[in-house]
Image: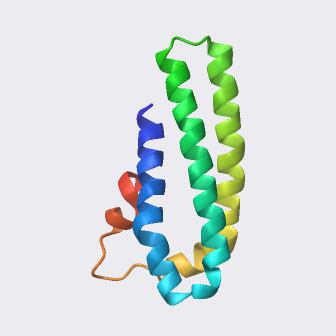
Amino acid sequence: MGFCAALTGHHRSEDATLFDVVLADRPELAPVVADLKRDHSMLDHLLGELERAALSGAAQDALLRHLDGIEAVMETHFRYEEKKLVDVLDGAVPSDVGRQEMLGPLA
């Protein structure tokens, strides 16, 4: 559950800070950012469902199904993010914005 909380914090930091920095430099990436934000919203929902299942004492097989769904979305999300943004992100960290502010607790 700690990793899920850190992942959620990471995505919220990207949505609140990092993507604004990216779009300021590369406005043509707005559709990519919209896709990534949509993934973040979906993952937020899936992680919340996992947490509710875990807190309710769901069986291990039910928890594993939740994790399988999260894994599938995360795999495609990271692959897409790396393909579309890795070059941009290599140069996107302005000196006046902290790395953790942009990337959250996984920075």
Measured as percent of width and height from the top left, residue 79 is found at 69, 60
Q: Quadrant of the C terminus?
A: bottom left
Measured as percent of width and height from the top left, residue 31 is found at 67, 74
Measured as percent of width and height from the top left, residue 78 is found at 64, 57
In the displayed structure, does residue 102 sit left or right of residue 53?
left
Q: Check the image and report above or below for 32 versus 14.
A: below
Q: How is the image coloured?
A: rainbow
Residue at the image position 54 percent from the left and 44 percent from the top: 44
Q: Check the image and report above or below for 97 versus 81.
A: below
Give the tally of numbered discs. 0
In the displayed structure, does residue 91 sit left or right of residue 63?
left
Residue at the image position 41 percent from the left and 65 percent from the top: 16
Q: Check the image and report above or below for 73 versus 52.
A: below
| Of 23 and 106, the residue lying toward us | 23
Name the quadrant containing residue 94. Answer: bottom left
Q: Quadrant of the N terminus?
A: top left
Q: Residue furthest left?
A: 96
Residue at the image position 59 percent from the left and 80 percent from the top: 87
Residue at the image position 65 percent from the left and 29 percent from the top: 66
Measured as percent of width and height from the top left, residue 56 is found at 50, 14
Q: Check the image and report above or below for 15 versus 22.
A: above
